[in-house]
Image (spheres, rainbow, N blue to C red):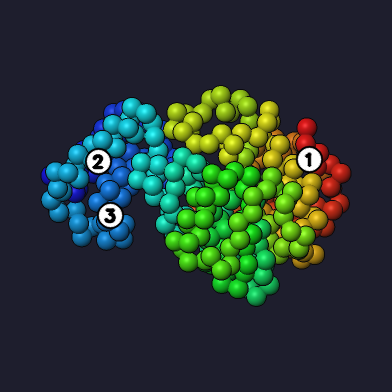
Amino acid sequence: MKVIQLIDSVSTQFTDAGLVFGHGTDNANDEAFYLVTSVLDIPHDEAGLHFDREVLGEDIKRIEEFVIRRIKDRVPVAYLVNRAWFAGLEFFVDDRVLVPRSPLAELILKRFSPWKEQGTIHRILDLGTGSGCIAVAAATAIAEALVDAVDISEDALEVAAINIKNCGVSERVRLIQSDFFVNVPEVFYDIIISNPPYVSEIEMSELAPEYRQEPVIGLAAGSDGLKSVLSILHDASNFLANDGILVIEVGNSQDTLESYLPDVAFTWLELELGGEGVFLLNKEDLVTHQSKFKVK
């Protein structure tokens, strides 16, 4: 069987199984491409050169085993192949961390322009780093920046350490085990960025099986999905430089957050590559409204 035939076969099986996509792909064909090219170690940008290649029997067997797990157990492909991509970089992932998929990648690749001028970003804080994808991508995009990557999960930090090493940014990315700001050093950051948990209790109960494979600690954020973001908002001004910016992704919790904090002038970012629920605030905003940022 040729590579392209194998991709088509897997795609058909995924479609027939009624799978839910969203961990790096949004359809059966892309998911099949992801699985087959990863197992065969075919670079995505060279895939067309390999479509007519005959696939070895042992590779077909391995892919068939992964297809069964994807369909039967609803395990995301990223966990099956231990590979995911974010901001053009490859990351190791397993079920200790969320699969990278944040729209924050676009902002990082633009080096936070137009919100920060080039040459003004020296310290970045990534809260809830998980796999380390945001921290590593930021360090890669902004070579002069030092990045502190924070997570409460020791398991997640172990995965992040692998990616920091693999991507060659060990000298500029520091891992800190902390519940958000608790153990963060008392320095001022030019950018504080976070893709924190923001899924409400109701949404957690309705998650598709694929998302239930991910660590709950990276998703669940209390009854209304605001527990984590309110905690960050309350303390961020103490760690943000005077001309710094806070950037947080809250996804589907955008409406809930705006309803809870109607007086806060959130700047909601419009992203060319898609994705919603990403806001920006400056230090003045945070100081002015700090008393309102109380966790329910």
Give the mark, 3 or 1, whose residue is nearer the N terminus: 3
Q: Residue at x 31, y 57 (%)?
A: 44
Residue type (three-letter) at the residue carrying disc 3: Asp
| Residue closer to the observer: 230 or 110 | 230
Q: Please name the residue shown 63% across and 73% down the image.
A: 118
> Mark 3 packing: few (<14 Cα in 10 Å), some, or many (20+)?
few
Measuring from the top left, give residue 64's x and y in whole percent. 23, 36
Judged from the image, the secondary structure of the residue bearing numbered disc 3 is: loop
Q: Which residue is mark 2?
A: 63
Residue at the extreme bottom:
119
Quote the CA–CA distance across marks 3 and 2. Answer: 12 Å
The foreground one among 49 and 65 is 65
Q: Circle 2 — which element?
A: helix
Identity, as a three-letter code, of the amino acid under mark 1: Leu
Q: Is residue 284 left or right of residue 204?
A: right
Q: Which residue position holds label 3?
A: 41
Q: Is residue 195 left or right of residue 67?
A: right
Locate residue 53: give its quadrant: bottom left
Quadrant of the image occupied by residue 45: bottom left
Residue at the image position 47 percent from the left and 44 percent from the top: 99
Asked if residue 276 shows in the view, the reply is no
**Residue 196, x across and y down, in percent:** 63, 44
Say the numbered circle drawn on residue 261.
Answer: 1
Left or right: 206 in relation to 150: left
